[in-house]
Image (cartoon, rainbow, N blue to C red):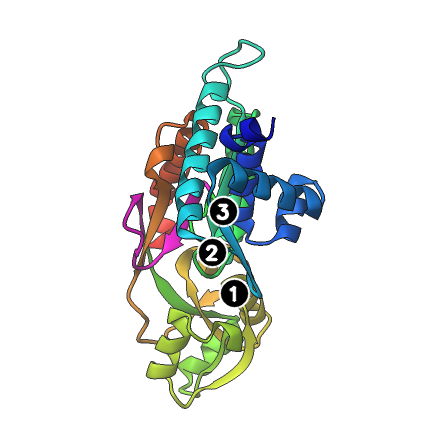
Amino acid sequence: MTDKKRTEIDWQDMRIFLALGRYGSLSATARALRVNHATVARRVQSLEESVGKKLVERRPEGYVLTPAGHDALKVAAEMEVAAQTMKHAGTSDGDGSLRGLVRINAPPALAQGFILSRLTQLAESYPGIDIDLATNLRSVSLDRHKADIAVRVGRLVDADLIAKSLGGMAFGFYGAQAQCERIERGEPPVFVNFNEESADMPGTSWLTQHFPRARISLRAENHILQAIAARDGAGLALLPHYLGRALSGLSLCALGPVPPSRDMWLLIRRQDRNVPTLRVVMQHLIDSFKENEALFGD
């Protein structure tokens, strides 16, 4: 009986190992799967016994995959995709509709200020598709399968992903009308910018380089918060046009220079490109950005 267990792979072991590879800790994996820590640890150990290799190492920062673990994670992800494809090939009701969960990752402001409302439109057309929208200022790894689709801004560094262009994102200085009038009178600008934890964001370094002596009156972690602060009179915020134009109470101020436009991309793993639910959501997002090119451009 023991020998059989060690040579046959249990799909539930693979499913929990895949989740551990995504979330990086027992606690996060247990919460996501609604099981206890012991179940996660036992399932991962069972999988290691089945394949005869060490797949994870526990370190102070969490669980880290071994080289064999990275290989196993790819296999587990392919198994998940195959299961999803089989599941979505038909439906339980026989009505031709699609069902399943699609996880999307995008920068906070882009997710809240543009993508979210477009996804609600998708829900009307495909009520069987469930969306999990997560936001991160910094890119998450699709290789660790923390998301199915990623929307990113700026230079791409992922070699083995399918990338679809979503156009360009242009910027301008926005603030309350009174702040813009101060600039027109020749008074020095006061800015709202990213906080210290996000000091490496492109907008922060650019602003420091071009306005080195300017006062930063308020610092916030994302463009949404910065836009609200600028609207309420804290100073000028360097915002993407789609956000500055959409938030009532903000005016585009006559201040320059501004940074160059940044490219926007939609990313998906190559092995997922034929999953029906992902294809539908991906195309909906691509179409939404194309239909709103004027919102993002100069």
Gap in angstroms between the C-alphas marked 3 and 2: 15 Å
Q: Amino acid at mark 2?
A: Pro
Q: Which mark is residue 222?
A: 1
User: Is residue 146 located in the magenta-colored stretch of the structure?
Assistant: no
106 horizontally vs 28: left or right: left
Q: Position of residue 214 (x, y in %)?
A: 44, 87
| Element type at mark 3 | loop
Residue 56 position, x and y percent, is 51, 51
Q: Kindly identify which numbered label has been placed on residue 146.
A: 3
Circle 2 SS class: loop
Q: Residue 106 in the image: x percent, y percent?
A: 46, 51
Q: Is residue 229 above or below residue 11?
A: below
Under circle 1, the secondary element is loop
Q: Residue at x 34, y 52 (%)?
A: 264
| Disc 1 and disc 2 in contact, CB within 8 angstroms | yes
Q: Is residue 200 above or below residue 74?
A: below
Going from the N terminus, do you reach mark 3 or mark 1 first?
Answer: 3
Badge 3 or badge 2: first in the primary sequence: 2
* Left or right: where 210 falls relative to 52: left
Q: Residues within 10 Å of mark 3 (few under 14, many from 20)?
A: many
Which residue carries the number 2 mark? 107
Q: Quadrant of the C terminus?
A: bottom left
Identify which amino acid the numbered label 3 is placed on: Lys
Q: Residue at x 47, y 66 (%)?
A: 251
At label 1, counting other C-alpha atoms closer than 10 Å, the crowd grade (few under 14, some 14-19, many 20 or more) is some
Q: Quadrant of the N terminus?
A: top right
Instruction: Check whether the beta carbons of the residues at disc 3 and disc 1 lie within 8 A of each other.
Output: no
Viewer-nearest residue: 258 or 53: 53
Disc 3 vs disc 1: which is toward the camera? 3
| Residue 40 spot, x, y in % from top left | 64, 44
Q: Is residue 195 visible?
A: no
